[in-house]
Amino acid sequence: MHSLTLVPRFYETDAFGHINNTVVAGWFETGRATVFEMFADPDDPKTMPLILARIEVDFVAQIYYGTDVEIRTWIDSLGNSSFHVCQEAWQNGACVARGRAVQVYFDHATQRSAPLPPDKRAKLESLTVKH
């Protein structure tokens, strides 16, 4: 499991005074950066062989400005060419959002998915947590 602490910014709040629902998907993408770095040079995003096939977010509680948020990221399952990334956002000791993303290993030349290479699979397995 990987953990990242974010500081909510004032402009991420909405008219109700809590963090806007659209922000959480971006925070989760930031949390997945550790996974992206396993596949490509962060200075050259064109080498990224992953595409996002699906994302879902469940909002468990309101998230507020003024208190740090911890994003927890882990791999839930591995397929032949895809894998599931699970994430949670925590604030003040409580889970405030849960997310799941399906990432696909993708060959941009053929425009098709491709099997996960063994070395990448091994790295992903190191982040696998079963809940």
Image (tube, helix red, strand yellow):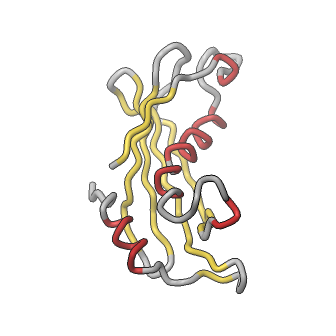
Q: Answer with left or right where residue 123 lies relative to residue 97.
A: left
Closest to the observer, 3 or 46: 46
Q: Spot the residue most to the left.
A: 130
Q: Answer with left or right where residue 70 lies relative to residue 129.
A: right
Picture quarter with the C terminus: bottom left
Placement of 43 over or under 88, stated as above or below: below
Q: Image quadrant of residue 76?
A: bottom left
Question: Residue at image x 45%, y 80%?
Answer: 117
User: Residue 59: image x %, image y %?
Assistant: 51, 37
Q: Spot the residue most to the bottom.
A: 110
Placement of 106 over or under 101, stated as above or below: below
Question: Residue at image x 32%, y 25%?
Answer: 93
User: Residue 105: image x %, image y %?
Assistant: 56, 74
Placement of 113 over or under 85, stated as above or below: below
Question: Residue at image x 37%, y 46%?
Answer: 2
Placement of 123 over or under 27, stated as above or below: below
Question: Residue at image x 50%, y 83%?
Answer: 115
Closest to the observer, 17 or 75: 75
User: Residue 83: image x %, image y %?
Assistant: 46, 68
Q: How many marks?
A: 0
